[in-house]
Each structure stands twice: as C-alpha cells, then as structure tokens.
Image: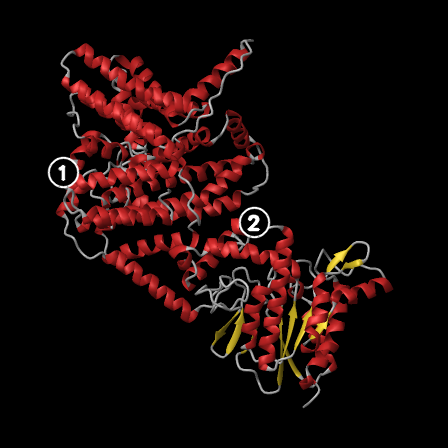
Amino acid sequence: MDRPSSTSNSERSRAGQSRARWPLGALFACALLVIGELGTRAWFRPPYVTLDTYTSYYPNWPEYGFEGSRACFRIRDEMSCARSQDMNVIPQTFPAKKPVGELRIVVVGSSVSWEGSGRGQGSSDGNYPSRTLDLLQRAHPDRKLRLINLSVPGFGTTREVVRFREGLEYEPDLFVVHVHDTNEIREDQRRAYVAQLHSGVAGKLLYLHSVAVLKAWWSDFLGVRAPRAVAPESGEEAESEAHKLERWQTGIERNVQTMLGLARARGVPVVVVGPSRSDRRQGVRDRPLNGIFEAEIGGSAQFLNVVQLFAAEYARRPRPLFKDNVHYSAEGTRLVATALAPRIEMALPALHSR
Amino acid sequence: MLFNTGRFALFFALVFTANWLLGRRFRAQNLLLVAVSQWFYASWDYRFLALLWFSMLVDYFVALRIEQSSDPVRRKRLITLSVSVQLGILGVFKYANFFVASGGALLARLGFHVHPVVLGIVLPVGISFYTFQTMSYTIDVYRGVIPAERNLLSFATFVSLFPQLVAGPIERARRILPQINAPRTLPLAEFYRGSGLIFFGLYKKVFIADNLGPIVDAAFERSATLTRAEAVLALYAFAFQIYGDFSGYTDIARGTAKLLGFDFALNFRRPYLARNPSDFWQRWHISLSSWLRDYLYIPLGGNKGGQARTLRNLFLTMLLGGLWHGASWTFVLWGAYHGLLLVAHRLLKPVLQRIQPRGVLGGMWSIARCTVMFHLVVLGWLPFRARTLTQVTDVLSGIARRGGSLGDAALTAKWLVACTTLLILLELTEELRPNFLERWQFWARGLVYAAVMISILIAGAPGGQTFIYFQF
C-alpha cells in the first residue's frame, strides 16, 4: 500500500513499472493485530467488557445485554472484579471456587447499593451491603462470610438480571437484590446507545479485548472518562409518559420475578430491597412498586421496604436519611444495614447451623 | 453520504464490483459511474441535481460551439457566456445573500436605512468545485489546449464523477478526459495504492480531524474568555484538524478513484513543511491554487508587467481565492492575509536568497523557515475558522492577554500530542525520504499500518462527522 501524500504525480507510471506482489506489510499488520488480540485475551484483564452477542438473557428487550460479558474475570484460580465500561463494579477479588465453610452473599443492584455515604459520590466505602456484612460478621464471628457486590451505578433491573446470572456462577448462599426504579430510564438510553455504538463491523471491532485495553490506556493518558451510556431516544421510543411508566413498571416486575425464579430453581434465598426517594417534608417518598413487591414477592423471598423503614424513623426523629435524592446518608445507610441483617439471618439458615 | 460512513463503504463496494464486472467496456462503465454519481449527489439534496446538469450542459454545448467557430469575436462571446453562467450560478447560490447583506450594512453606515431582501437559498453542496471544474474545461477549449468533448456521457462523467464531486480535487479535463475515454485497468499495485490512500485518509479524518474538532469547537464557542494558552492551542488544533479533514477527504477521493481505474491529481504535499508562502500554495489544495494560477493570476498578467503589477495580481488572486471558500468577510480576510504573505515573500525573496547559509547552517535555516511559515499559516487559520470578525478579534485578544490560568490548555496539548505525533513523524520521514514506506521492509511497514489501524480503532470518533470543505 501507498502513503497518501506520495510526492510524485507520476504514480500511475510507477505503478505500471512496479511488480504486483503480496501486500506483506498489510498482512503483517493484520497478523500483529491478531497476535495482540490473542495476547490480550491470555494475559490482560479486560478493563472493558466485551460484547460478543446479544442473547436471550433479557426478558424484555433481547437486544440489551451481552453474553460473555462479566463484571468479574477468572484469572487462574481467582475471580477478579474490575471496572469496566459503563460498569463501575467495585474492585474485588475472591476465589473462583468457594472454599469449604464460606457463605457467600451476592448483591445485585445499582448506585444505591454501590455507593457509600462516607466520601460523597463516587466512593463505595461503607455502603449498606458492606455495613450489613460487618453486622453479620460481628453477630456470627465463627462464620466465614464473603460479600460479592456486583452492583453497578445506573443499572436498572434489565441489566441486573445479567449480573444476577453471573452471580449464580459464584456459588451464592444468598442474594440481595436492590431495585432502584428510576434507573429504568437509563435502560432505555442504554438500549439506544448500544444500538448506535455497536452497529456494523466497526462497532464489533471496538469491543475486541486488545482494543478495549488500548482504549483504557488512551483514556487514562488523556484523562478521558469512559463514555456514559446516554443516547437520545429513538423514534420508536417516543411514547407517552404514562405508557413508559407502565412499561417500566411491568419490566421491573418481570425482571424481579425472573431473578426470583432463577434463585428458586437453584434453591438460593433472596432478599429484595425496595426503591425509595427523598422527600423534603416527610423524609421519604413512597414508590408504587413497594406495594406490588409486598403483595407479590410474599413468601418466595424476604422484602425490605425502605420507605416504611425511613418513614417510621423520620416520624420518630426527623433528620436527613438521604444525602441527595436517592442515595442514603450515613444515617440512612446504618438504618438499612441494621434492618437488612436480621432479614438475611432469617433467610439464610446456614448462618446458624455448623 | 459521507466517505467515513458504513453506508458509503457499502455503496462503494457495490459500485466497485459493478464497475469491474463490466471489464474493459469503458463506455458502459462511464454510464454506470454517471448514474451512481447522480444518486450519490442526490443523497445530499436531489433538488440541486438540476443545477449540476444545467451547469454541465451549458459548458458542454458552449465548448462545442467555441470549437466549431473560427470567429474570434464569437468565440469570445461564447466563453464570456460560459464564464458568466458559472459565476452567475455561484453568485446567486453562494454570494447573493453576502453581497446584499454587506451592501445593506454599508448603506446603513452611510445613513440610508434599507431592508435588503435576503434569499432563503441553501448552498448546493460542491457548487464551488464543479463550477470551477467546468469553467477550466471551456477556457482550455477556448485557448485551444484541449479539443471539445463530443460525447455527453464522457463529459458528464468528467464533471460528476462522485469521488471528486462534492469537495474536489478540482480536476482538469486534459488530465481526466483521456482516462474517461479509454479502457481502464486496475493493476494489483494500483489496487494497493488506492486502498492505502483510503486507509490513511480515514486515519486523518476519523482519528485526527474528528478528535480535534470538538476541542476547537469548544474553544471557539467561548472565544471571548480564552486564555493565551487556550487560544494558541486551539489554533494549533484547528491547523491539524483542517489538514486531517481536507487532506483525509482528498486521500479517500483519490483512493476510491484509483480503485475505479482513475488517477486524480495530488492535492496535498505535506503543506506544513513549506518554507515560504509560495511553497505553501504549491503544497496546500494544489488543485485550487494551480487553478487560480492558470485561470486568474496569469490572465491578470501574472508576473509580467513589473513588480507592482505582479504584487497586485498576487494579492487579488489570493483575495478572490479566499472569497471562493465562502461568502463571509472572514474568508476575505483569510485570502487577504495570504495575499499579503505572498507579496511580502516576493519582496523579501532576494534578501532571503542572499542570506541563505550553506552546510549545517543551511539545514537549520530551512528548519527555521519551516517553523516560521508553519506559525504564519496557523495564525492565518484564525479568520478561516472564526464565524465572525468579532471572534477573530476575541481570539487575538486572548493571545495578547497576559497571565491567566492554563484552563483547558493542558488537556488540549495532550490531545494534540496524542493525535498528531504519528502523522508528524510520517510526514517528516516522507519529506526527507520520499516513498519511504515502499522502501521499508514489510515488517516496518506493517508496524506503521498496525499503529494507524489501532489509532482508528481506539480513538476513531464514532459516527460520520461531516467534512469541513463540504460547506464550500
């Protein structure tokens, strides 16, 4: 191949003279890229998730997720959970095979179950699952407990199902599923974003492991954050607010039932933590889904109604239980952890038996 | 349909296949190319196809009449008709609003308040390119340089061939018509060259231009508050953005043409390594600068008629060249700036030749001249990029402003380094050792290709961004 800015105007005549031969340079470049890809797959932990195919993982919108995409990657005998594109999974490492005697609690949720109250936004220090673990560990010092938190900020229930399926592979003894209803809008945006980003051959190439690793280096060098999953709604999404709400609500119900069904099939107990939102006057605002969960989840799982919990506490002693519209303050985090721990104890008989 | 989209890739793959399935039947190939070129142009705005054909048919018939006539007066009338029609099209569709608005503003300053009628005309894409291309054809026929083309299909292929239709290069009939009227072939070596041009063109566009574009846009949006570092780096960024954008487009155009069996003229030759203004215009948008030289500068008298007339001709040519780019005072200013640079260089040329050192010092002198010229060109991009003259003064004030924080400059500097390092290395090597890639071992070439490919993959801006020169 030629450089574009060859100096001579007589390329044609030169071409006539030059012998046609194999494009060894281009072939060598392709070979390098293939070697780079294979090498990356073998040696590097992908900082971004690869998108292989869209599969039937998704009860509502099959084109959503990505089979083979993981929050945690197996490296020899360990699972290593890394930050990935649009997936700020809490970095954590744990043995791929559950050690004898260990009890695993897998949390699937969004920013509310990811984010801590301590250092403002963006830090997972001291979130309510980890505080719950502390309480449980204190109550059962002889038990070996491990928390695997697969929560990802911004995730709605559709993508939570993906994380739930992944969580099933880590031999969980109990699931905590945090449902945050307003994230469903992100799912819609994500859908449009994914369709746009991954269309065509170039879209597929962008998710090669080697490209993903290099993209991370490039972004680090330039201080560029991974793009957020935001895209304008497509024409087909231009539907009425009422219809959207109905669709989202139906979707959430179906997704939660899917997760409960999957857990039931494996005999893994589940605790569902319901959505909540701050309210200036009453401390907390009710969400319609809580009523549905109370009624429908019933005996198949434990349900923690955060709105009821916070409303009662606020009525007793008014103080901020949220640090913003949806994320818990230190006090809110403590309250949820304290209420969650006994539910886990109730749902997890293995905690009491030796 | 942009060159840097999947839609164009599919379109071109189909055209390429159909073109070579026709074998050596070049007339059938011409018919195919005219048909797909109309479709290509209609994908921008089908309404202006009529204008394209009007422009084309006028020059087709006028050129035939010019050739048939031996009466100098009649020939002169015919060429005047042709040039008037083409300039008239440009005048109405490109400059009418500008002149009406400018005239209104001038009258208002003189105290006459008028309400000029502004025409709601959309600028037809590629109008400046195809009108200049057909004009050069009739002028060449008039001058007796080439015979008139009798076959309308061949002439339509020359004017509307899609790789060069919307943003050039402005091809000459004497170069392209013989290629159109003969069987075309695609030797393997040419196939590689064409593919290489497209590959590097895409790299320049999606990696360099499209990554620097948002930085430049952001800087010019808040031009009034730029710090010195931000203003300077925004200009550097634009210099590389426009080079990546336009030369990238040209490379893709030349590459696609090559894959169809045509050989388009070189349009860029490492312009930022020019040593003086004259050298710059022999390296930047060569098809336009040579057009201006042959059909404007020389008819104005060129360098005959003394120093003063030469300087006037140089200045006028560049002024009109600036106006060719767009109907705005900023483009006039850009043209005038380059005109003044050429005038200054003409005046200083004897002095520069006298003090030209030799040996090692000569090399350093060349580097210094390249550096100075590069910065003069970068400064010239300010009016070219600015939307208004106020924006020009805002950015200049930013450059003159003392102190101020680094602001976004550090990030812009990082982007500049990241986006341009490979390009600069390739251009410098090409300047010192022409066609170096062809001479290198395959593995070294492969490393370069892999680096370019990876650049496109990791940082190629997604979604086809439009090309800057499409607005002209």
How many numbered marks, from 0 up?
2
Under tag 1, what secondary structure? loop
Q: Residue at x 73, y 77 (%)?
A: A343
Q: Where is residue A316 drawn, in percent x and y?
A: 86, 64
Q: Where is residue B354 drawn, in percent x and y?
A: 28, 25
Check disc 2 and report the residue beneath it. Answer: A238
Q: Which mark is residue B200?
A: none
Crowd around label 1: few <14 · some 14–19 · many ≥20 (10 Å): few
Q: Label 1 amino acid?
A: Ala
Q: Residue at x 53, y 15 (%)?
A: B115
Check disc 1 and report the residue beneath it. Answer: B182
- Badge 2 and badge 1 both on one subunit: no
Q: Is residue A154 left or right of residue B46?
A: right
Q: Is residue A122 above or below residue A103?
A: above
Q: Nearer the viewer, residue B269 or A152?
A: A152
Q: Label 2 amino acid?
A: Ala
Q: Nearer the viewer, residue B312 or B161?
A: B161
Quick check: can you spot residue A204? yes
Could you tell me which quadrant the C terminus of chain B lies in?
A: top left
Q: Is residue A341 above or below residue B15?
A: below
Chain identifier of the residue bearing label 2 in the image: A
Chain identifier of the residue bearing label 1 in the image: B
Could you tell me which quadrant the N terminus of chain B lies in?
A: top left
Residue sitting farthest toward the right:
A316
Residue sitting farthest toward the bottom:
A354
Quick check: can you spot residue B268? no
Q: Where is residue A160 drawn, in percent x and y?
A: 58, 67
Discs 2, 1 touching: Cβ within 8 Å:
no
